Every structure is written in structure tokens, then in C-alpha cells.
Amino acid sequence: METDDNKALVRRFYAEIDAGNIAAMDELVAEDYLDHNPPFPGLPGGREGLKVAFSIFWTATPGRHEIEDQVAEGDRVVTRLTASGTHQGDLPGPLPATGANLRESAVAIHRIEHGRIVEHWSSRDDLGLIQQLGVVRTPGAEGGNT
């Protein structure tokens, strides 16, 4: 069944990222990949931009993705996931390494065409992430930046 194949492709996509196998993106992702919600400004377009983004994350916050739920219909796969890692390297912003353990929930939608990921949308808990990094203070919390 095509929807099962599409879900398996997205699961493999996250597994390869977690293994640090950025080169696998050449097989899994179309060259003209379109990310509607890139994680950083100024990234190159297409698959190369995706590889740059994941290289930054892999270096700065090695960790893993836990897939909570997955639903597929037609050429789209919706994945609810939790990403976790340790902030051991600098992130663009600049956000110097804090050593903090990080968790971020997200919902990602991938569009699949000819067995490759061609398009991506996401909704991430970026506020929760930057609170964990100490960029903004949680209301009522001691310390931190405002």
C-alpha cells in the first residue's frame, strides 16, 4: 500500500538523521525539496539547504526523534514527534552551547512524490525550545533572560 510506503519513508528519514547519516538525504529527498518552515533564515534552497540545517542540528544538538503518531493519506504523511538532544554546540542566532537537555514537540507534514520527500511543512514548539535555551524567561521562573 502506497501510504504505508510513504510512512516508512518518513520514519527512515528521521532514523537516518538520528544516525547522523546526512548523505542518505540524497536518496530520500528530492533535489528541489521545498521547506515551507525552514529552521534558520538564509539557508540555501532545496535538498542542500535541508542537509545544511540537519548538519547544524546534528553538531549543536545531537539527539533523536521519537515518532508519536503518523497518519498518511494520498501523497502526504503527517507525523507528530518529539525531538530531544543536548545543546553542546552553538546554534545560529547566535545561541552559544548551554549543555541543556532539550525537548521539542512538533507536527510535520511531508509530501511524497516518486518515492522521495518533495515538500515539508511543520509546526514546532519553538517558544518552548528557546525557553529551554534561556533565551526567554518562563513567566514566574527565577533567573533567565527577558
Image (cartoon, rainbow, N blue to C red):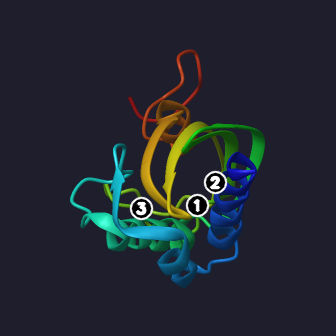
Q: Is residue 134 above or below residue 117?
A: above
* Residue 89 in view, yes or no: no
Pick whichever of labels 1 and 2 is earlier in the sequence. Answer: 1
* Disc marking residue 29: none
Quadrant position of residue 125: top right
Give left or right: position of 118 versus 62: left
Q: Amino acid under label 1?
A: His
Identify the residue position indicated by label 2 in the image: 100
Q: CA distance from mark 3 to mark 1?
A: 9 Å
Q: Which mark is residue 87?
A: 1
Q: Position of residue 43 (x, y in %)?
A: 26, 63
98 and 49: which is toward the camera: 49
Residue furthest left in the image:
42
The reply to whether the C-beta atoms of the residues labelled 3 and 1 are less than 8 Å apart is yes
> Would you place residue 22 above or below residue 36 in this image?
below
Give the residue drawn at x 55%, y 33%.
Answer: 128
Q: Look at the image and tell me in which quarter the C terminus lies.
A: top left
